[in-house]
Protein backbone atom coordinates (compact mmCIF):
# COMPACT_ATOMS: atom_id res chain seq x y z
CA UNK A 1 0.00 0.00 0.00
CA UNK A 2 1.40 3.38 -0.87
CA UNK A 3 2.29 5.71 2.00
CA UNK A 4 -0.16 8.40 0.96
CA UNK A 5 -3.08 5.98 1.05
CA UNK A 6 -1.89 4.70 4.41
CA UNK A 7 -1.70 8.21 5.79
CA UNK A 8 -5.14 9.02 4.39
CA UNK A 9 -6.53 6.00 6.11
CA UNK A 10 -4.87 7.09 9.31
CA UNK A 11 -6.46 10.50 8.96
CA UNK A 12 -9.86 8.94 8.37
CA UNK A 13 -9.75 6.53 11.25
CA UNK A 14 -8.09 8.92 13.76
CA UNK A 15 -11.30 10.70 14.89
CA UNK A 16 -13.11 7.55 15.99
CA UNK A 17 -10.00 6.24 17.77
CA UNK A 18 -9.53 9.50 19.61
CA UNK A 19 -13.20 9.87 20.38
CA UNK A 20 -13.19 6.39 21.98
CA UNK A 21 -10.70 7.42 24.70
CA UNK A 22 -12.56 8.02 27.94
CA UNK A 23 -9.68 9.01 30.17
CA UNK A 24 -6.47 10.97 29.86
CA UNK A 25 -4.38 7.82 30.20
CA UNK A 26 -6.44 6.05 27.51
CA UNK A 27 -5.85 9.07 25.30
CA UNK A 28 -2.12 8.77 25.85
CA UNK A 29 -2.27 5.20 24.54
CA UNK A 30 -4.21 6.37 21.50
CA UNK A 31 -1.58 9.04 20.92
CA UNK A 32 1.19 6.43 20.92
CA UNK A 33 -0.84 4.29 18.56
CA UNK A 34 -1.47 7.18 16.14
CA UNK A 35 1.77 9.13 16.28
CA UNK A 36 4.28 6.87 18.04
CA UNK A 37 7.27 5.01 16.60
CA UNK A 38 5.19 2.04 15.44
CA UNK A 39 2.26 4.04 14.11
CA UNK A 40 1.59 4.55 10.42
CA UNK A 41 2.85 8.10 10.77
CA UNK A 42 5.99 6.83 12.49
CA UNK A 43 6.61 4.19 9.87
CA UNK A 44 6.15 6.57 6.95
CA UNK A 45 8.45 9.12 8.61
CA UNK A 46 11.13 6.46 8.97
CA UNK A 47 10.75 5.28 5.36
CA UNK A 48 11.09 8.79 3.87
CA UNK A 49 14.82 8.33 3.29
CA UNK A 50 14.20 5.34 1.00
CA UNK A 51 11.53 6.99 -1.14
CA UNK A 52 12.03 8.05 -4.69
CA UNK A 53 12.99 11.70 -4.92
CA UNK A 54 9.88 12.91 -6.74
CA UNK A 55 7.58 11.17 -4.25
CA UNK A 56 9.21 12.69 -1.21
CA UNK A 57 7.61 16.17 -1.21
CA UNK A 58 4.13 14.73 -1.70
CA UNK A 59 4.54 12.13 1.00
CA UNK A 60 6.23 14.69 3.21
CA UNK A 61 3.31 17.08 2.79
CA UNK A 62 0.81 14.30 3.57
CA UNK A 63 2.87 13.29 6.57
CA UNK A 64 2.75 16.84 7.92
CA UNK A 65 -0.93 17.08 7.19
CA UNK A 66 -1.64 13.78 8.99
CA UNK A 67 0.55 14.67 11.97
CA UNK A 68 -1.00 18.12 12.26
CA UNK A 69 -4.57 16.90 11.97
CA UNK A 70 -4.12 14.04 14.39
CA UNK A 71 -2.25 16.25 16.85
CA UNK A 72 -5.04 18.84 16.73
CA UNK A 73 -7.66 16.19 17.37
CA UNK A 74 -5.64 14.79 20.27
CA UNK A 75 -5.19 18.26 21.80
CA UNK A 76 -8.85 18.99 21.51
CA UNK A 77 -9.77 15.71 23.16
CA UNK A 78 -7.18 16.20 25.89
CA UNK A 79 -8.67 19.56 26.81
CA UNK A 80 -12.12 18.04 26.89
CA UNK A 81 -11.00 15.17 29.17
CA UNK A 82 -9.08 17.51 31.45
CA UNK A 83 -12.19 19.65 31.89
CA UNK A 84 -14.24 16.56 32.64
CA UNK A 85 -11.79 15.27 35.22
CA UNK A 86 -11.61 18.65 36.92
CA UNK A 87 -15.38 18.75 36.99
CA UNK A 88 -15.49 15.30 38.65
CA UNK A 89 -12.83 16.23 41.16
CA UNK A 90 -14.67 19.41 42.10
CA UNK A 91 -17.88 17.44 42.55
CA UNK A 92 -16.09 14.85 44.72
CA UNK A 93 -14.45 17.39 46.93
CA UNK A 94 -17.39 19.74 47.17
CA UNK A 95 -18.43 20.85 50.66
CA UNK A 96 -22.12 21.10 51.30
CA UNK A 97 -22.30 24.47 52.95
CA UNK A 98 -25.99 24.04 53.64
CA UNK A 99 -25.24 21.15 56.03
CA UNK A 100 -25.53 21.96 59.75
CA UNK A 101 -22.14 22.44 61.39
CA UNK A 102 -21.30 20.28 64.39
CA UNK A 103 -22.01 22.63 67.27
CA UNK A 104 -20.41 22.36 70.67
CA UNK A 105 -22.58 23.57 73.54
CA UNK A 106 -21.00 26.52 75.25
CA UNK A 107 -20.46 26.31 78.98
CA UNK A 108 -20.96 29.09 81.48
CA UNK A 109 -20.40 29.84 85.13
CA UNK A 110 -22.83 28.29 87.58
CA UNK A 111 -25.50 30.73 88.77
CA UNK A 112 -24.06 30.61 92.31
CA UNK A 113 -20.61 31.55 91.04
CA UNK A 114 -22.15 34.34 88.94
CA UNK A 115 -23.94 35.65 92.03
CA UNK A 116 -20.75 35.52 94.11
CA UNK A 117 -18.80 37.33 91.39
CA UNK A 118 -21.40 40.05 91.18
CA UNK A 119 -21.48 40.67 94.93
CA UNK A 120 -17.69 40.63 95.12
CA UNK A 121 -17.47 43.14 92.26
CA UNK A 122 -19.67 45.59 94.13
CA UNK A 123 -17.44 45.48 97.21
CA UNK A 124 -14.23 45.56 95.19
CA UNK A 125 -15.68 48.75 93.72
CA UNK A 126 -15.72 50.13 97.29
CA UNK A 127 -12.07 49.20 97.79
CA UNK A 128 -12.53 45.85 99.54
CA UNK A 129 -9.99 43.05 99.10
CA UNK A 130 -11.01 39.44 98.46
CA UNK A 131 -9.81 36.92 101.07
CA UNK A 132 -10.28 33.22 101.61
CA UNK A 133 -9.62 30.56 104.20
CA UNK A 134 -9.76 26.80 104.74
CA UNK A 135 -12.99 24.82 104.63
CA UNK A 136 -11.56 22.33 107.13
CA UNK A 137 -11.19 24.73 110.01
CA UNK A 138 -10.00 24.68 113.60
CA UNK A 139 -12.83 24.98 116.10
CA UNK A 140 -10.83 27.86 117.53
CA UNK A 141 -11.36 30.07 114.45
CA UNK A 142 -14.88 28.88 113.76
CA UNK A 143 -16.08 29.47 117.35
CA UNK A 144 -13.65 30.59 120.09
CA UNK A 145 -11.95 33.43 118.25
CA UNK A 146 -15.44 34.61 117.38
CA UNK A 147 -16.52 34.94 120.99
CA UNK A 148 -18.67 31.81 120.87
CA UNK A 149 -18.92 30.24 124.32
CA UNK A 150 -18.00 26.58 124.73
CA UNK A 151 -21.60 25.82 125.60
CA UNK A 152 -23.09 27.38 122.47
CA UNK A 153 -25.55 24.96 120.81
CA UNK A 154 -24.12 25.52 117.32
CA UNK A 155 -21.03 23.65 118.49
CA UNK A 156 -22.99 20.45 118.94
CA UNK A 157 -22.48 17.59 116.57
CA UNK A 158 -26.12 18.01 115.63
CA UNK A 159 -25.20 21.30 113.94
CA UNK A 160 -21.55 21.03 113.01
CA UNK A 161 -19.65 18.37 111.08
CA UNK A 162 -16.45 17.47 112.90
CA UNK A 163 -13.42 15.95 111.20
CA UNK A 164 -11.49 15.64 114.44
CA UNK A 165 -13.48 15.76 117.63
CA UNK A 166 -12.40 15.58 121.27
CA UNK A 167 -9.62 17.81 122.55
CA UNK A 168 -11.16 21.29 122.38
CA UNK A 169 -7.78 22.86 121.57
CA UNK A 170 -7.36 21.11 118.23
CA UNK A 171 -10.78 20.10 117.13
CA UNK A 172 -11.14 20.30 113.33
CA UNK A 173 -14.49 20.83 111.69
CA UNK A 174 -16.03 21.82 108.37
CA UNK A 175 -16.56 25.54 108.83
CA UNK A 176 -20.18 26.42 109.49
CA UNK A 177 -19.76 29.96 108.17
CA UNK A 178 -17.14 32.14 106.50
CA UNK A 179 -16.69 34.20 109.68
CA UNK A 180 -13.52 32.33 110.81
CA UNK A 181 -11.72 34.14 107.97
CA UNK A 182 -12.40 37.39 109.90
CA UNK A 183 -10.24 36.07 112.73
CA UNK A 184 -7.59 34.63 110.43
CA UNK A 185 -7.26 37.83 108.43
CA UNK A 186 -7.06 40.12 111.47
CA UNK A 187 -4.46 37.87 113.05
CA UNK A 188 -2.13 38.36 110.09
CA UNK A 189 -2.99 41.93 108.97
CA UNK A 190 -3.00 45.30 110.65
CA UNK A 191 -6.04 47.58 110.36
CA UNK A 192 -7.54 49.07 108.29
CA UNK A 193 -9.32 45.94 107.09
CA UNK A 194 -11.82 45.90 104.25
CA UNK A 195 -12.37 42.35 103.02
CA UNK A 196 -15.01 40.16 101.43
CA UNK A 197 -14.72 36.39 101.74
CA UNK A 198 -16.64 34.09 99.44
CA UNK A 199 -16.56 30.38 100.16
CA UNK A 200 -18.18 27.05 100.83
CA UNK A 201 -19.72 26.30 104.23
CA UNK A 202 -21.16 23.20 105.87
CA UNK A 203 -23.89 22.36 108.37
CA UNK A 204 -25.64 19.15 109.33
CA UNK A 205 -28.85 20.44 107.80
CA UNK A 206 -31.34 18.05 106.24
CA UNK A 207 -31.99 18.89 102.62
CA UNK A 208 -35.22 20.77 102.06
CA UNK A 209 -36.38 23.62 99.82
CA UNK A 210 -34.16 26.14 101.62
CA UNK A 211 -31.35 24.07 103.18
CA UNK A 212 -28.37 22.16 101.88
CA UNK A 213 -25.61 20.70 104.06
CA UNK A 214 -23.09 22.30 101.70
CA UNK A 215 -23.78 25.88 100.72
CA UNK A 216 -21.99 29.21 100.27
CA UNK A 217 -21.52 32.41 102.14
CA UNK A 218 -19.97 35.77 101.44
CA UNK A 219 -18.50 37.39 104.51
CA UNK A 220 -17.71 41.05 104.81
CA UNK A 221 -15.48 42.72 107.38
CA UNK A 222 -14.48 46.34 107.81
CA UNK A 223 -12.25 47.43 110.70
CA UNK A 224 -10.83 50.92 110.90
CA UNK A 225 -10.77 53.94 113.15
CA UNK A 226 -14.17 55.49 113.85
CA UNK A 227 -16.33 52.90 112.16
CA UNK A 228 -19.89 53.26 113.40
CA UNK A 229 -23.22 51.55 112.87
CA UNK A 230 -24.31 53.94 110.12
CA UNK A 231 -21.25 52.87 108.10
CA UNK A 232 -22.61 49.33 108.22
CA UNK A 233 -26.05 50.43 107.12
CA UNK A 234 -24.77 52.78 104.41
CA UNK A 235 -22.45 50.15 102.98
CA UNK A 236 -25.15 47.49 102.85
CA UNK A 237 -27.65 49.97 101.40
CA UNK A 238 -25.18 50.76 98.63
CA UNK A 239 -24.71 47.06 97.99
CA UNK A 240 -28.49 46.40 97.94
CA UNK A 241 -29.05 49.20 95.43
CA UNK A 242 -26.31 47.89 93.15
CA UNK A 243 -27.57 44.32 93.41
CA UNK A 244 -31.36 44.71 93.46
CA UNK A 245 -31.83 48.11 91.86
CA UNK A 246 -31.54 51.81 92.78
CA UNK A 247 -34.99 52.00 94.37
CA UNK A 248 -34.07 49.46 97.09
CA UNK A 249 -34.49 50.30 100.77
CA UNK A 250 -32.99 48.34 103.66
CA UNK A 251 -34.14 47.81 107.20
CA UNK A 252 -32.35 46.30 110.17
CA UNK A 253 -34.00 44.13 112.81
CA UNK A 254 -32.33 43.29 116.13
CA UNK A 255 -30.73 39.88 116.21
CA UNK A 256 -27.94 38.02 117.95
CA UNK A 257 -24.57 36.63 116.91
CA UNK A 258 -21.81 35.91 119.44
CA UNK A 259 -19.27 37.83 117.38
CA UNK A 260 -21.20 41.06 116.79
CA UNK A 261 -22.70 43.53 119.20
CA UNK A 262 -25.17 44.89 118.40
CA UNK A 263 -26.31 42.35 115.83
CA UNK A 264 -28.97 42.69 113.17
CA UNK A 265 -30.76 40.93 110.36
CA UNK A 266 -31.01 43.03 107.25
CA UNK A 267 -34.05 43.02 104.99
CA UNK A 268 -34.25 44.67 101.59
CA UNK A 269 -37.44 46.08 100.15
CA UNK A 270 -39.03 43.74 97.62
CA UNK A 271 -37.70 44.58 94.15
CA UNK A 272 -40.71 42.99 92.47
CA UNK A 273 -43.61 44.84 94.15
CA UNK A 274 -41.70 47.76 95.65
CA UNK A 275 -43.11 47.03 99.06
CA UNK A 276 -46.36 45.39 99.95
CA UNK A 277 -48.39 44.13 97.03
CA UNK A 278 -50.68 41.43 98.46
CA UNK A 279 -49.63 37.98 97.25
CA UNK A 280 -46.47 39.25 95.48
CA UNK A 281 -44.70 36.27 93.90
CA UNK A 282 -41.36 37.32 95.39
CA UNK A 283 -42.10 38.56 98.92
CA UNK A 284 -45.55 37.03 99.40
CA UNK A 285 -46.91 40.45 100.29
CA UNK A 286 -44.54 41.17 103.16
CA UNK A 287 -42.79 43.88 101.17
CA UNK A 288 -39.41 42.91 102.60
CA UNK A 289 -36.94 40.13 101.87
CA UNK A 290 -34.82 38.72 104.68
CA UNK A 291 -31.29 38.67 103.39
CA UNK A 292 -28.38 38.58 105.76
CA UNK A 293 -26.90 38.77 109.25
CA UNK A 294 -24.65 41.61 110.32
CA UNK A 295 -23.48 43.73 113.23
CA UNK A 296 -20.69 45.69 114.85
CA UNK A 297 -17.65 43.50 115.51
CA UNK A 298 -17.67 42.50 119.18
CA UNK A 299 -14.69 44.04 121.05
CA UNK A 300 -13.81 40.54 122.28
CA UNK A 301 -13.27 39.44 118.67
CA UNK A 302 -11.00 42.42 117.98
CA UNK A 303 -9.07 41.66 121.13
CA UNK A 304 -8.70 37.95 120.35
CA UNK A 305 -7.15 39.01 117.02
CA UNK A 306 -4.70 41.31 118.80
CA UNK A 307 -6.44 44.58 117.85
CA UNK A 308 -7.08 47.36 120.35
CA UNK A 309 -10.87 47.84 120.63
CA UNK A 310 -10.28 51.30 122.04
CA UNK A 311 -8.52 52.38 118.89
CA UNK A 312 -10.44 50.58 116.13
CA UNK A 313 -13.97 49.36 115.56
CA UNK A 314 -15.69 47.56 112.76
CA UNK A 315 -18.69 45.91 111.23
CA UNK A 316 -19.24 42.51 109.67
CA UNK A 317 -21.90 40.80 107.62
CA UNK A 318 -22.58 37.41 106.13
CA UNK A 319 -24.88 36.62 103.22
CA UNK A 320 -25.83 33.46 101.32
CA UNK A 321 -25.51 33.57 97.54
CA UNK A 322 -28.01 30.69 97.24
CA UNK A 323 -30.58 32.80 99.05
CA UNK A 324 -29.72 35.86 96.94
CA UNK A 325 -30.10 33.94 93.69
CA UNK A 326 -33.37 32.34 94.82
CA UNK A 327 -34.88 35.67 95.80
CA UNK A 328 -33.73 37.43 92.69
CA UNK A 329 -34.76 34.79 90.15
CA UNK A 330 -37.82 33.42 91.94
CA UNK A 331 -36.27 29.96 92.35
CA UNK A 332 -38.51 27.81 94.50
CA UNK A 333 -36.02 25.24 95.76
CA UNK A 334 -32.34 25.41 96.68
CA UNK A 335 -32.01 21.85 95.36
CA UNK A 336 -32.08 23.12 91.76
CA UNK A 337 -28.57 24.48 92.25
CA UNK A 338 -27.08 21.03 92.74
CA UNK A 339 -29.26 18.95 90.42
CA UNK A 340 -26.95 19.71 87.48
CA UNK A 341 -29.92 19.92 85.16
CA UNK A 342 -28.77 21.96 82.18
CA UNK A 343 -32.35 23.01 81.45
CA UNK A 344 -32.21 24.87 84.77
CA UNK A 345 -28.58 26.00 84.73
CA UNK A 346 -28.76 27.13 81.09
CA UNK A 347 -31.25 29.85 82.02
CA UNK A 348 -28.67 31.96 83.81
N1 LIG B 1 -21.81 34.03 110.33
C1 LIG B 1 -23.21 34.38 110.44
C2 LIG B 1 -24.05 33.20 109.97
O1 LIG B 1 -23.54 32.30 109.40
C3 LIG B 1 -23.54 35.59 109.61
C4 LIG B 1 -22.86 36.82 110.15
C5 LIG B 1 -21.64 37.20 109.65
C6 LIG B 1 -23.48 37.61 111.09
C7 LIG B 1 -21.01 38.35 110.12
C8 LIG B 1 -22.87 38.74 111.58
C9 LIG B 1 -21.64 39.10 111.06
O2 LIG B 1 -25.24 33.19 110.17
Image (cartoon, rainbow, N blue to C red):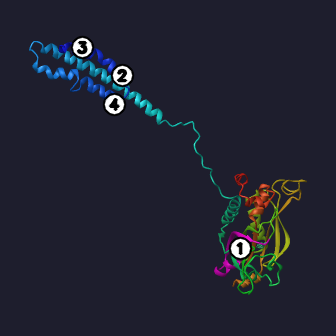
Q: Quadrant of residue 312?
A: bottom right
Residue picked out by circle 4: 25
Residue 323: x %, y % from top left: 78, 63
Residue 221: x %, y % from top left: 71, 73
Circle nearer the viewer, 3 or 1:
3
Q: Residues within 10 Å of mark 3 (few under 14, many from 20)?
A: some
| Residue at the image position 59 percent from the left and 40 percent from the top | 100
Q: Which residues are magenta?
A: 179-204
Taking the magenta stretch, the answer to whether it contains residue 193 is yes
- Helix, strand or loop under label 1: strand
Marks 4,3: beta carbons within 8 A: no
Q: Earlier in the sequence, mark 2 or mark 3?
A: 3
Residue picked out by circle 3: 8
Q: Residues within 10 Å of mark 1 (few under 14, many from 20)?
A: many
Real-space Cα distance between discs 2 and 1? 95 Å
Q: Quadrant of the N terminus?
A: top left
- Helix, strand or loop under label 4: helix
Circle nearer the viewer, 2 or 1:
2
Residue picked out by circle 1: 222
Q: Quadrant of the C terminus?
A: bottom right
Amino acid sequence: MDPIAKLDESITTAPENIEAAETLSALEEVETRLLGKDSVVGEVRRSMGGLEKELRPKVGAKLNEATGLIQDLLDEKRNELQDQELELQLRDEAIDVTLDAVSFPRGRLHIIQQTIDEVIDIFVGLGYQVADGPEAELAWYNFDALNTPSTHPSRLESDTMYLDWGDPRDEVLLRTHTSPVQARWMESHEPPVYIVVPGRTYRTDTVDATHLPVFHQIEGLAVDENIVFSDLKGTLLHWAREFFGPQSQVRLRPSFFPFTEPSAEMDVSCFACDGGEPGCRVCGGAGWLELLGCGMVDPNVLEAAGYDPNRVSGFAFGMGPERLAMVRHGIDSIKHFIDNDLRFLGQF
